[in-house]
Amino acid sequence: MNKRHFPWVFISQTLLCTSLVLLGNSCIDNKYDLNKDISMVIGIGGELGIPLGETEEKALRDLLGPDDIADLDTTDGAYGLHKKEDIIAKIERFDDVTIDEIDASTDFKITFKTLTIDPISFPENEPDITMSKEPISRPEMNITPIMGRSDLSTTLTLGSFPEGVIPEVKITLRRPDNVDFEISNIFCPTEITSISSVVLGSQAKLEWDLSDIKNKLRLSSGTITLTDFQINFPEGFVLSNPSKGKIVGDNVLSLVGEQLPCDRNIITFTLERYEKTIQNQNGSISGFTEEITYSGDLKFSISGVTTGTDAGDCNISMPLVLSCSPQVSDMHMSLSGVNVDVPQTVISNEVDITGINEEVTKINKVYFDESSKITVTSSPLNLGELALRGNNALIDFSSKLTFAPDNNTWDNGKLVITPSEIKNGFTKTVTLQSIDLSGEELSGTNNSKSIHFEPDFIVGSMKLTVSGNTTFSGLQEFNNNVKVPVKVTSAMLDVVDADVETSAFTSNLEEHSADIDIKDVSIPDKIEDLGWVQLKSPSKISLAMDVNPIPEGAGEMRFQNLNIDFPAFIELESDQKIEVHKDQGGNVLYRRLVLDGKGAIFTKNSVTRSWTNAGMKLNITKLDLTQAESYKLIEGKLSLSEVIKVSGNVVLGEGSISLTDLQGDINVDTKVSVAPMEVGIVACRVKENVTDENPHTKIDLGDLSDYLKEGSKLYLPKANFKLKASNPLGVPVDVDLVFKPYKNGRLLLMDAPSVPVSINAYQHVEDISNADTTRLMIVGKEYPENIPAPEGYTKIQFDRLSEVIEQVPDSIIIDAYPKADAPVAGSWHMVNLDRPNNDMDIKCEVGVPFALGDNINIVYCDTIDNIQDDLDDIFDKVTVSEIILNVKVTNGVPLNLKLKVIPLGPDAEEPISSSDLKVLFDDNTEGNIAAGSYNFDSQKTEPTETTVQIKIIEVNGSNALKRLDGLELKIEGGLGDQNKGTEGGVPLKTSQSIKAKVGLKVKGIQADMNEF
């Protein structure tokens, strides 16, 4: 028997769905050979049994998998289809909403009296600040006097010289002996880490007596010329001022080429200093000795005038002496870690503030102009190269004094003086802005009031260390009580303003209103109404007040508790005080900007005084038009009836108001303006049609339809469409989803069914990087009620879902028709205009679990061929009247099946006519095969075993059995009328299988025994 793959493929095709054709082919190996295995016990009319074998058990998982059908899903052991597609609803970026500038203005009049305060004088003050430290002893050093004598002599063999000039005589002497330089008994305080240079300034002399040459050679005059002779002091010596010769490399006296008279010579020079680093070892320094050496060959020539000499040997003595008594005049040394304390010092000041008006009952603060400066100086300390290190000194001016920002270094309001500035001197100038006098009492009569004020300046203590290089003299200076010459210079401070408590200088303003005028509003076509708008960035409110005319000599002024009332629809942010006034029902009536006196300072410009809020934070962040009275939006024009109101008090003497007279009425022109505003988030009503075109998507099911028999219908009770709709708009959207199933380009349903769904509005439109996701699960009416939707999904019933799928379409077109849902009462649509696009992404996920349904049609095919190979030995010797086929079927499919047999002729190709062979079923079974038993609780199928006996009888001696070479077995089944006992709705699973075991009997044998 040959196994053919094609029929098995159709097994898998048919098991996938509820109305399929299941075709299969089993391969049964030959188990019996008449020449070897059959017993030859033969009786006439008896039976001959031949076991043909059994088929392999074939489960759906072996026949069909995800590689056969695109998007086939078998993850839970059951078959289903899983497809994903996207529907993109293109919603272009909304055009900008812009609100043009806002203007409002009003005029009013004010009147003031005069306020005066005399200039304030700060006296000069120089405190006594002395460094506190332990004195450092002077190092002691003993230097042994230098004394070196060398007795130089030689014997000259001379010829006789007549009177007159003698010829040149050359002489070579040995080098003089080295001379010791010795330092002993060095005492050094531990604060001194090393000595780097010893200052001597001592005179040394070289004595060389050449008179013996003069005497022995009877010279009336004579000189010697030195060829090569140097005196080498140890490295570190610095020599100077030689009377003869020259200094080479600081420490060498060279006499090369010098001429000396033949007499007693004295050459002097100075030992300036001895530069050698001598390290201190806990106060003890060991003495040491170094050598002074001579270098060069001591050669010289003698010339002169003689009175005449006799020939012969002449012994000449030339003693040489080097001597010096070094005295230490100073030393260069290094100090390390010498602790110095600078104590805290209080600089007391007495200040009188005079010339205060009789109307003034209290002064809280006085203000000064930029020329009002206090200067603190200190001259340099005489510390030489010594360095000061440690903490800074902090000058704490009285907390009642406020200074302007400057280039000085401050630490929490205290002026910083560094150790370097203490040493090198400094000048610190600070600009006084104001003095807080709120705690000071007025004294004197009404006609002459004054305040006596004693602010203390505290110079903080310093912990310092002194290190670096110094000398004896510098150490002496350091040991003396070093004073830090800090001085506060005198200053005259002009009062330009004062914060006073007085009724006499207050002018109460009546409330004044300014109509708000908004020039223009630009609104996108997709928006048909505005609720409120939040600006992309706060828009600055510019306030301006011009005061004029002001009489000559009048000073500056400011508002005290200036109130500017903005209408309720304007929301503000400010670094000033904002009061929100509401009615009894909690509704905002207006927002009041309260300026506390420093908020509106007038500066002088010719005869006009102006104030703006340039340095003040005052911005519009939001416009809530629902709070505006008589608000109308007509063709992009914004119409409303709102005003800004100004009220409060005006006083002299606060901030930078000058203290000169103000007389008569003063006109104040007040303007409020806002630059054009760009809107970021808008609460509005969006028009219904938010898209320019209706999006759609196509779900391709082509592979599935290829596997299904024409006319099949799917039974899919658990089929569902999961939707994940991502909505970036703060607008709820209703979408009609229209399903159009197609097969071979033909629309299967002319009245395409639709299902309405609602997509939630995005709740966080301020975040343009995200969007809200609405999760919906569309199911048919057959979907089991006891199966919930996945977590986060809402189940929506679509009664016609089964119609869309049951005819096995090769594709489904889903058209989406979105439209904006009207906002619920009391709310608005929300749109972020900064979002680059507002595309709505609807992700479709199709889930189709397959099950057995009413229109099932299953055929299992099995072909047994090459039967003649097994029966030739029998048919050659005997005549056979019939054969019996025993088929034992193990059915793991929950369907009742029926077995049919078709005899096949040579090569198992053409059927044998029923007039030649009859096929009969024994025991009235009619080939019925019992269904497997499916347990819905355990979701498993228990297989059943059914044995079917089939007779194949030769008719009228046709000898057709000898032509029988194959049998085609068909196992058919379904859930129609012929199979009402089988339960539908069972899921198709990969584990469901069919297996057959086949046996063959030969009956009705007639034989001629002579042929055996």
Image: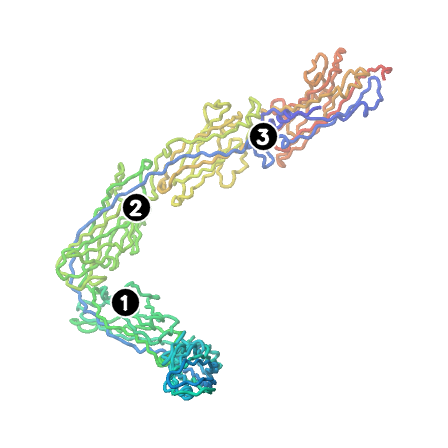
Q: Quadrant of the C terminus?
A: top right
Q: CA distance from mark 2 to mark 3?
A: 62 Å
Label 2 with label 3: CB-CB less than 8 Å: no
Task: Decide: is 148 above or below 907.
Answer: below
Residue 623: mark in rendering: 2
Q: SS of the residue at dot 3?
A: loop
Q: CA distance from mark 2 to mark 1?
A: 45 Å
Residue 68: mark in rendering: 3
Residue 722 percent location from the top left of the image: 49, 35
Can residue 466 be seen here? The reply is: no
Left or right placement of residue 408 versus residue 702 in this view:
left
Q: Residue furthest top?
A: 956
Estimate how packed mark 1 is, as few (under 14), some (14 to 19) or many (20 or more) residues with alpha carbons within 10 Å.
many
Instruction: Report which quarter residue 218 is drawn in.
Output: bottom left
Q: Amino acid at mark 3?
A: Asp
Residue 180 percent location from the top left of the image: 47, 83
Residue 666 percent location from the top left of the image: 15, 56
Estimate how packed mark 2 is, as few (under 14), some (14 to 19) or many (20 or more) residues with alpha carbons within 10 Å.
many
Instruction: Report which quarter residue 306 is drawn in.
Output: bottom left
Pick whichever of labels 2 and 1 is earlier in the sequence.
Answer: 1
Residue 430: mark in rendering: 1
Q: Amino acid at mark 1?
A: Val
